[in-house]
Image (cartoon, helix red, strand yellow):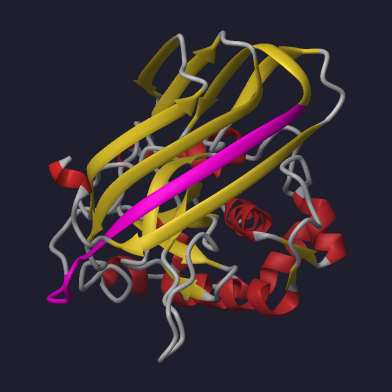
């Protein structure tokens, strides 16, 4: 099992967030039984601490539990047996996040030639899984061709990551609803549009095509309002980005959706080889319903106290 970055933090201050993630399902007919599983609990790591977490299900679940997967992510399970036309899942958490270590993006691990970051030997054994292509394959000739300009021989790893991040940001259009969770990287590459999960998966495929270990990271991004403006409630969303392993067992986070490296504004919920490893929610329902509507609202706000004392 791999781990997220260890080490001392910068002299900058940590940030603490209160996160509310609401998901509402409405059905056209009665649902007699609903099984759900998801990844909604922020992880604990050297730079992140989940100080409070609760999950509310309405109607109330007859059975619920939590467990950890092979990567250490917390998975929540619930079973609702009460007949219902609406199902509401609300997770609330308080999370403290430290800035990246001083040397994470500028130290020897990041400044070394990118080829050295390929997992080899015993020290890279745990990361090798993250170099493997998916099934069906995402690494195609077109993908390799797109990735190639970023991977100049001997180029420092951090320069490769920043160049790839910036190229995806400028070459692709963010368009909500243009893809689904089953959209392939090849389709995104051809259409030149998508959303955060598509851009993360594209970056990951480019990195794996060159032998690097890359993970898919799911979580939240705190958005700061423009100067002089009040922050809007409920407009944030779940977010996805990529991370690359280095031989120092550090993961360098990159966000091609926003053309930046990951910092203390990012709250990690889970990571794996692909979206399918850490979906926020998925499940099975028993119903004659012919249609359904899902509404998702996420709010990431500065923590102002209260929940920890509840």
Residue 290: where, in percent of width, then height?
Answer: 87, 23
| Left or right of 94, for residue 133 | right
Which stretch appears magenta? 10-27
Residues 112 and 91: in front is: 91
Residue at the spot 32% in from the left edge and 34% down from the top edge: 54
In which quadrant is the N terminus drawn? top left
Residue at the spot 84% in from the left edge and 29% down from the top edge: 291
Q: Is residue 26 magenta?
A: yes
| Left or right of 159, for residue 247 | left
Residues 308 and 86: in front is: 86
Residue at the spot 52% in from the left edge and 23% down from the top edge: 37
Residue 33: where, in percent of width, then height?
Answer: 63, 10
Residue at the spot 51% in from the left edge and 56% down from the top edge: 242
Residue 141: where, in percent of width, then height?
Answer: 81, 55
Q: Is residue 194 visible?
A: yes
> Looking at the picture, does residue 114 appear above or below residue 78?
below
Residue 201: where, in percent of width, then height?
Answer: 63, 52
In which quadrant is the C terminus drawn? top left
| Left or right of 252, for residue 29 | right
Q: Is residue 274 visible?
A: no
The image quadrant of residue 75 is: top left
Q: Residue furthest bottom?
A: 228
Marker count (numbered): 0
Q: Is residue 29 magenta?
A: no
Q: Main secondary structure of the magenta part?
A: strand
The image quadrant of residue 63 is: top left
| Left or right of 198, for residue 114 | left
């Amino acid at each position: 099992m791999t781990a997220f970055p260890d080490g001392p933090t910068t002299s900058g201050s940590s940030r603490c967030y209160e996160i509310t993630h609401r998901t509402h399902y409405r059905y056209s007919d009665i649902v007699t039984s609903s099984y759900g599983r998801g990844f909604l609990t922020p992880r604990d790591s050297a730079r992140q601490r989940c100080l409070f977490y609760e999950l509310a299900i309405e109607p109330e679940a007859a059975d619920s539990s939590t467990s950890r997967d092979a990567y250490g992510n917390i998975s929540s399970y619930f079973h609702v047996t009460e007949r219902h036309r609406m199902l509401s899942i609300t997770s609330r958490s308080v999370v403290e996040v430290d800035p990246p270590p001083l040397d994470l993006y500028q130290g020897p691990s990041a400044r070394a030639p990118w080829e050295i970051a390929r997992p080899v030997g015993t020290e890279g054994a745990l990361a090798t899984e993250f170099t493997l292509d998916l099934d069906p394959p995402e690494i195609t000739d077109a993908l390799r061709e797109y990735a190639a300009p970023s991977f100049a021989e001997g180029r420092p790893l951090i320069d490769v990551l920043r160049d790839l991040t910036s190229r995806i940001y400028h070459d692709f259009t963010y368009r909500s609803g243009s893809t689904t969770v089953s959209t392939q990287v090849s389709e995104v590459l051809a259409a030149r549009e998508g959303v955060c999960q598509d851009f993360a998966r594209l970056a990951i495929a480019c990195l794996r095509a060159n032998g690097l270990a890359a993970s898919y990271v799911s979580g939240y991004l705190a958005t700061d309002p423009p100067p002089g403006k009040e922050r809007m409630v409920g407009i944030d969303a779940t977010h996805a980005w990529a991370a690359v392993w280095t031989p120092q067992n550090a993961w360098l986070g990159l966000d091609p959706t926003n053309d930046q490296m990951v910092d203390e504004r990012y709250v990690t919920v889970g990571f794996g080889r692909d979206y399918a490893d850490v979906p926020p929610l998925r499940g099975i329902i028993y119903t004659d319903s012919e249609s359904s509507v899902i509404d998702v609202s996420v709010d990431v706000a500065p923590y102002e106290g209260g929940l920890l004392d509840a």
